[in-house]
Image: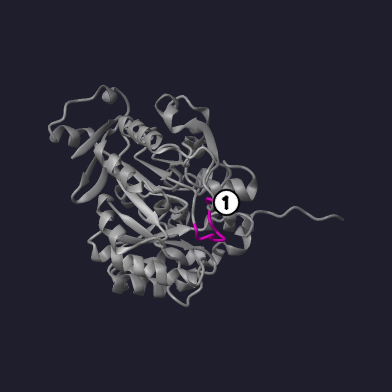
Amino acid sequence: MKYRYETFGGIIASDAPPFLAFVDRQYMREQGLADSPLWSGSEEIGVLCAPTEVHLSVTNRCPSGCAHCYMSAGEADEAELSTDAFKEALGALAELGVFHVAMGGGEALAREDLFELAAYAREVGLVPNLTTSGHLMTPEVAERMTVFGQVNVSMDAVDGEPGYRAPSHFGKADAALTMLLSAGVPTGINCVVGRRSFDALPKLFEYCGSKGVNELELLRLKPAGRGGPTYSEEKTTHEQNKRLAPLLETLGNKWQVVAKIDCSFVPMLAYHRPDKEVLYRLATFGCEAGNVLLGGRSNGQISGCSFLDGTCVSVFELKEAWHASEELKRLRGFAATMAEPCASCHYLDICKGGCHAVSAYVTGDISAPDPDCPFVVEFGESAPKAAGPT
């Protein structure tokens, strides 16, 4: 069992079975661990000692050219980290106390040293996970994927259903899933959910149930990269956002599929007024950019998450910048400065005002309430309208 001290107690992690849990001080003591100097003050969960997970683009190279790609992937980033520099970055994250690194791209398999980097992550105590399009998968590559804790293949819709990728993508992704599952790799699907793919979800759940993947991760379409210019036409509608949570519950139960939502969908979950204590216990939170989570480009530049602009901090400066960076402090402070209706919302401490990548793109203000949150939409509809000219 791996662990890390925090002011509230600590974080413990396991590979078998895989889990990450925030626990109180008493639980840490019950594991035979000594008291920490961090325990002298409040037990509230605030700024962590380090992120628990960092999403690292190992390369921006990608052959797919998807129109909605949040990384605008295609060509390699300038100053893409070398093998040795990337290992140095992984070592720095491990020293900081990070638990997981989610490797992606671009297309991560376009990087020739991917498995060397994943093995090194294991060597220094990090659990590497992977997201891939599956286009470069072969049976031999699939056999090597056991180095990863989890591998997710991108798929927005089953064959013939409307999605965001080329028509040829489904066959390649389906073949990749077959190879990974045959190799005994823990395998799931990442699905981008937008207006056109929403009604394809029932058939995708059915496919997941029959295929035998271990999870379906639902990612809200973001206005980042090539997805920005078409966001207003492609984002989920207000009615779809309201229907999302009950639909996922129904489909998950019907097909016995473990469905997860990314943090940007938490406002849509909160709209149905779930029990907050249950959300806390399940560690279901909205925007945790710059605290629980960080993003990183293949040149080492750090961002609050993969969908936000980069900061002035590089991965090699993160140890010193974690508590000192004004950019990171601002990302952590959204909940304290939110305008209505977020300021009075029962779920503010969980949701943090929704997706701030969406807020920044749509409103020009990264600290504004998520404009697509159902609560925010209905608040705007009920607000008194200014009188027109007389």
**Which residue is at 42% across, 44% downward?**
56
Count of residue discs = 1
Asked if 383 appears above or below 30 in the picture, the reply is below
- Way the structure is coloured: one colour
Specify the quadrant of the image occupied by residue 337: top right
Residue 379 position, x and y percent, is 59, 54
Drawn side of residue 221 relative to residue 138, left or right? right
What's under tag 1, amino acid-wise?
Answer: Gly
**Which residue is pictured at 41% across the width and 45% down the height?**
55
The reply to whether residue 152 is visible in this rendering is: yes
Q: Quadrant of the C terminus?
A: bottom right
Quadrant for the N terminus, please: top left
Q: Nearer the viewer, residue 29 or 361?
A: 361
Look at the magenta stretch and give its main secondary structure: loop
Q: Nearer the viewer, residue 264 or 133?
A: 133
- Determine which quarter of the picture holds residue 185: bottom left
Magenta residues, start to end: 63-72
Would residue 4 be found to the left or right of residue 331 on screen? left
| Residue at point 58%, 44% (across, down) | 368
Label 1: element kind = helix
Residue position marked by numbered label 1 in the rendering:
225
Q: Residues within 10 Å of mark 1 (few under 14, many from 20)?
A: some
Q: Is residue 247 magenta?
A: no
Residue drawn at (64%, 56%) of the image: 229
Indicate the position of residue 186 as horizontal and vertical percent values. Answer: 26, 58
Q: Position of residue 280 (x, y in %)?
A: 33, 47
Residue that protrudes farthest toward the right in the picture: 390
Left or right of residue 210, residue 229 in this image? right
Q: Is residue 322 visible?
A: no
